[in-house]
Amino acid sequence: MEEEIPIKLPQILKKMTLMHAENVRLKKQIMHAEEAIQQSEQAVRAKAELELVLKQTQDQISEVQSITNSLQSENAKLRQQLIQRELLAKMEEQQQLAKMKAQLDKYELQQIDNQALISNLQKQLNINELALNNVKINTQKQIDAETKRLTQQNKELKTQLDDIMFRTGYKLDQDRIPYNLYETAIRDLRKSLKEQIEFRDQLQKRTDEVIETARDAESTHNEIVRELQEDVQNKIKKVADPLREHNRYLQEQYDTLISRTAADMQKIVKSNQQEHQQLIQSIEVFRQENITLQTKNTDLTELSQKQETQIAQISQAMQAQKRKLETLTHEKVYLQMILQDYQQEQQFDPQDILISKINNERELRQKFQENQLENQQIRLKLTTLQKVVKDKENAFSDILQQKQTFEDQANFYYKKLNEQNLKLEEYQKMTQVKYCEHLQGLMSVMRQQQDQMQRRFDIVNKEFSKYKHLDQDKDMLDKMQIKVDQVESTNSLLHKKVEMLEQQLNQYRETKKMDVLIGMLEQEKQEVAKRFTTQTPK
């Protein structure tokens, strides 16, 4: 046994030396782990920088969104202004059309009233003319009938006289009527003829007066119609001049609106182009920053892979160290058992051997304690390193998740920017083409409305030209009514006079039959006397 102890102690010392070398190697690995931790801290700082860049990118995207929102609000304001201007123009046009319609309705009512009044006047004039014509026709018929009757009676008397003279064979001078009777009869006949001629003259004079009165009424009617036409022309002029002035004002407003709209559209297009260029520049900067971030992300990925490899190596080394510690622990127990056996076998040892054993045992205990402390420190560092590695793994997973989120956000904002570019292009096309077409359509609609108003105005003028004499004017209608009343009173007087003349004519017919017969006899007597006087020389 005494020979075995010196053999085992060098082995133990050798193993302790190996353990010390292993501890040194573990310290180096721990230093490498600390360097890996520093690199992980650098990765955390890179993550913070990446978050800062992401925040700046989000700020830029929010600025782009604010610019887009401002553009959309500006477009909405412009559309609202255009709609308001169109509504104002339509409201003004509707007001003008309503005024014109009210005026047309007023003139139509006036036309209806005037037409009814003039139709009544025309009917009254027609009645008066018919009455006058009837009076003329009846008078002429009566005169013709009386003349025909007297002529027939004269013929009959002449036939009777010729028959009497033929049958009696008397000469006229033998059966001669006394001269004074003939003179009286002739005087009476002349008087009756004079009265008849005077009556005929009076009748003709009254007929002329009736005709003159009708002519005066017709001239009065024509004068009233002419005055009404002039008044209607003046009213049409009063209506037409404001309409023309309003059309001119609408045309000026329309031209001003078109010029202002064109200038505003040019400004908007120019500002949109500038903002579009700024957006393109911002997008280019954003793309460059994204490329830089992708490069940093690639570097971080490689660094993370390296850290994972180092962590795996450290874990393997720690597992090997743990196994070695377990082996050393077993060897220590084995050495303690050997020392106990040796102490039991050697109760009496020399002092130097005992001192050396004690010193060796102390050194072994001290080294064992140092190994235990180093193992505890290694375990603590391993635990800390595992915690750090776990934190790094969590941080790396967070970085990967943030990277994915950033890529998703970047793709989303790229998509949104592309949509915004498409909208800007569509807006530019709309502002350059569609809005011009819209303005042209608006111009054509306004021109069509203006043409419709002009055609309506022409129709109104045409209708007024047809019914110029049908306007209502109180003073003129009062004058016309007065003149109509005068014509009616004149016609009533004429009717009364005609009735009186008819009565006188009937009285004349009744009282003057014998006078007419005597006149006819006197005339026949004169003719017979002339005949006998012409036959006397024979």
Image: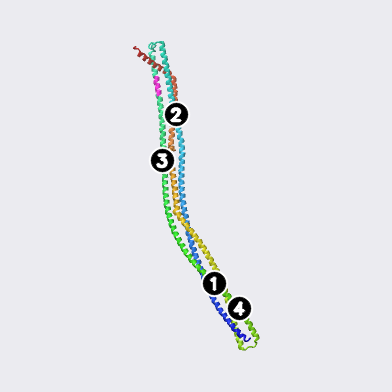
Residue kind at label 2, given as amino acid type: Leu
Counting residues from the N terminus, which is met first, the one under dot 2 or under dot 4? 2
Q: Are marks 3 and 1 in contact (CB under 8 Å)?
A: no
Numbered mark located on residue 234 in the image:
3
Task: Tell me the residue that label 2 is attached to.
Answer: 130
Q: Are marks 4 and 3 in contact (CB under 8 Å)?
A: no
Neighbor class of circle 2 (other Cα within 10 Å; few <14, some 14-19, many 20+) is few
The Cα–Cα distance between marks 3 and 2, rounded to whole angstroms, is 36 Å
Does any portion of residue 404 appear in the rendered image?
Answer: yes
Picture residue at 46% right of the left edge, 57% below the top: 425
Q: Quadrant of the C terminus?
A: top left
- Residue 27, given in percent of the width and then of the height, sits at 55, 77
**Numbered range of the magenta stretch:** 191-200
Which residue lies at the image location 50% right of the left edge and 60% below the top edge? Answer: 415
Q: Of helix, strand and loop, which one carries label 1? A: helix
Dots 2 and 4: beta carbons under 8 Å? no
Q: Earlier in the sequence, mark 4 or mark 3?
A: 3
